[in-house]
C-alpha cells in the first residue's frame, strides 16, 4: 500500500537539500518595543532582536487607539461574528467598515474578506467567470493570490513582462474591440520594491475599454495624502475599476477587501466562494481595522517617519555600494542569488548581530534571485539602520556574496 509518511518525508528532504525548507521563528512582539522583538528558540533561549522583515510598516499593530478599539469591541460584542455573512455574520462593525473603505477609495461600495488573499481569489475568480469570453492581462510578478483568482476565474490569461507598457498595449490591441478585457496589476511589487506606471497603464486600459484590477496591498496606509494608495497619490483612483487591499500590512490588523462600483462589488458578493463560504471576521478585528484606517486618513506622521528611515537606509546602501534593488517604494530588496547563501546570511545576521530577516526563496521569487527583503518601519532608528548596514557590509566583504550581481 502507498507509504504516505515516507512520501512526505522525501518531499521535505528535497526542500531541505535545496536550502529552501521553511524554518519559522517563534516571535514575541511586546507592545512598546517595536521593532525590537524576542525570539524564543527551541532550546529555551530567548533572544532580543531587531526585526527587519515585518509588513507592519507603520507599527499600527501596536498603536494604542487600535488596540483599545479591538478590546472595547470584543468586550461589547464578543470574540466571534457568529457565522458566515449569509448566515448571521454581518455585524454593525462590518457595515461601518465597508462604508468607510468605499469612502476611502472614492467608490460606491466595498466588500470585506477574511484576508487579502481570499479577496483576490474571490474577486478575480468572479470577474473571470462572469464576463463572457473575457481575457485577463496579468503582470508576470503578480502575487500568488491573484494567480489563484485568475485560475478560479478560468478565462483566457496573457502574462506580460513586468511593468511593460508596450507589451501590454500590443496584447490589448490584438483583441477584438468588444471582447471584455481585464488588466490585473499591483501598485507596489513587494519583492522588487518597485511601483507600477499606474497613470500610463490606466490611460492605456481606458483606450481599449479594459477593466483595471489593482492590488494595493502594500500601498494602502502608505501612499497618498490619506493613505488610500498609489492610485490616490497619482490622482487616478476614480479610473481604477476594482481596488483590492488588506488590513494586515500597514494597517496592522488582518482582513482584506475590494472597492468598486455598486454592481461589480455586488456581483463579487453574490458569487465569490471565498467570500460566501467562510465565517466573517470578528467585530473586534473590524473595529480595530476601522480605527487604523481612520487614523491614517488623518495622520501623516507615521508615513513621514517611515519615509525618513527608508531614505536613510537607501542612502547608506548607496554609500556602501550594496547591490540593493533601486525601486521607488518603501521596500528595499537585496539580492543574494542563491538559496543556501541567503540562508547563511540570515542565520549569521541572527546569530552574530541580533538582526532578524527572513530569507525570500523560490517560489516567492525565481530561483537564482533569492534575496533579503528589508522593510524599514516608522520606528526604526538611524542607529538600527547603521547596525544593519554595517553587519551586511561585513558579511558581503568576508563572504564575497552577491558576485553574480556585480559581475
Ligand atoms: C500579502 C499580499 C496579499 C495577501 O494579503 P493578506 O491580507 O496577507 O492575505 C495580496 N497581494 C499581495 C501583493 C500581497 O503581498
Image: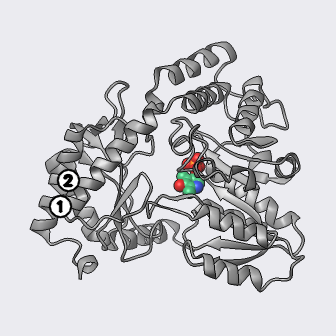
Mark sitting on residue 291: none
Which of 247/205 is in front? 205
> Is the residue 75 above or below the residue 228 in the image?
above
Q: Exactly how many numbered labels are in the figure?
A: 2
> Which residue does the image show at 74% across and 56% down from the upper left?
239
Q: Earlier in the sequence, mark 1 or mark 2?
A: 1
Q: Position of residue 77 (x, y in %)?
A: 69, 17
> Which residue does the image show at 37% across and 67% down from the upper left?
20
Mark sitting on residue 389: 2
Q: Secondary structure at mark 1?
A: loop
Q: Residue furthest bottom?
A: 174
Which of 273/213 is in front? 213
> Which residue does the image show at 61% across and 28% down from the upper left?
294
In this rendering, would 252 be left or right of 238? left
Q: Position of residue 397 (x, y in %)?
A: 11, 67
Q: Position of residue 76 (x, y in %)?
A: 67, 13
Q: Are marks 1 and 2 in contact (CB under 8 Å)?
A: yes
Q: Quadrant of residue 314?
A: bottom left
Q: Which residue is mark 1?
A: 320
> Which residue does the image show at 63% across and 62% down from the upper left?
199
Disc 1 residue crowd, few under 14, some 14–19, many 20+, Cα 10 Å = few
Q: Secondary structure at mark 2?
A: helix
Q: Is the C terminus in the top left, top right, bottom left or bottom right quadrant?
A: bottom left
Q: Position of residue 108 (x, y in %)?
A: 82, 41
Q: Is mark 1 within 8 Å of ligand 1?
A: no
Which of 28/366 is in front? 366
Instruction: State the separation of the CA atoms marked 1 and 2.
Output: 8 Å
Residue 154 visible in image: no
Amino acid at each position: 500500500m502507498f507509504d504516505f509518511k515516507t512520501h512526505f518525508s522525501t518531499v521535505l528532504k528535497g526542500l531541505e537539500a535545496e536550502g529552501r525548507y521553511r524554518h519559522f521563528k517563534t516571535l514575541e512582539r511586546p507592545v512598546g518595543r517595536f521593532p525590537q522583538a524576542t525570539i524564543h528558540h527551541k532550546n529555551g533561549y530567548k533572544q532580543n532582536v531587531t526585526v527587519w522583515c515585518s509588513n507592519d510598516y507603520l507599527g499600527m499593530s501596536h498603536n494604542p487607539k487600535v488596540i483599545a478599539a479591538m478590546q472595547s469591541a470584543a468586550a461589547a460584542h464578543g470574540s466571534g461574528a457568529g457565522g458566515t455573512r449569509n448566515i448571521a455574520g454581518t455585524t454593525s462593525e462590518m457595515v461601518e467598515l465597508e462604508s468607510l473603505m468605499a469612502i476611502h477609495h472614492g467608490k460606491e461600495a466595498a466588500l470585506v474578506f477574511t484576508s487579502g488573499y481570499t479577496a483576490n481569489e474571490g474577486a478575480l475568480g468572479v470577474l473571470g467567470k462572469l464576463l463572457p469570453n473575457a481575457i485577463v492581462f496579468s503582470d508576470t510578478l503578480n502575487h500568488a493570490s491573484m494567480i489563484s483568482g485568475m485560475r478560479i476565474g478560468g478565462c483566457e490569461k496573457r502574462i506580460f513582462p513586468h511593468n511593460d507598457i508596450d507589451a501590454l498595449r500590443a496584447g490589448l490591441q490584438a483583441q477584438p474591440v468588444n471582447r471584455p478585457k481585464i488588466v490585473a496589476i499591483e501598485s507596489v511589487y513587494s519583492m522588487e520594491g518597485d511601483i507600477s506606471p499606474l497613470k500610463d497603464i490606466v490611460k492605456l486600459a481606458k483606450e481599449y475599454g479594459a477593466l483595471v484590477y489593482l492590488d494595493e496591498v502594500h500601498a494602502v496606509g502608505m501612499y497618498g495624502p490619506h493613505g488610500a494608495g498609489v492610485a490616490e497619490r497619482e490622482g487616478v483612483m476614480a479610473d481604477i475599476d476594482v481596488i483590492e487591499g488588506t488590513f494586515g500590512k500597514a494597517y496592522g490588523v488582518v482582513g482584506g477587501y475590494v472597492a468598486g462600483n455598486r454592481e461589480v462589488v455586488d456581483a463579487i458578493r453574490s458569487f465569490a466562494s471565498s467570500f460566501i463560504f467562510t465565517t466573517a471576521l470578528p467585530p473586534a478585528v473590524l473595529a480595530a481595522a476601522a480605527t487604523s484606517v481612520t487614523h491614517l486618513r488623518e495622520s501623516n506622521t507615521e508615513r513621514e517617519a517611515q519615509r525618513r528611515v527608508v531614505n536613510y537606509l537607501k542612502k547608506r546602501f548607496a554609500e556602501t555600494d550594496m547591490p540593493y534593488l533601486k525601486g521607488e517604494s518603501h521596500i528595499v530588496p537585496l539580492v543574494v542569488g542563491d538559496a543556501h547563501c541567503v540562508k547563511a546570511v540570515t542565520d549569521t545576521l541572527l546569530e552574530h548581530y541580533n538582526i532578524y530577516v527572513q530569507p525570500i526563496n523560490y517560489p516567492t521569487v525565481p530561483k537564482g534571485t533569492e534575496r533579503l527583503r528589508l522593510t524599514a518601519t516608522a520606528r526604526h532608528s538611524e542607529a538600527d539602520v547603521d547596525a544593519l548596514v554595517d553587519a551586511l557590509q561585513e558579511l558581503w566583504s568576508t563572504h564575497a556574496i552577491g558576485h553574480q550581481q556585480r559581475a
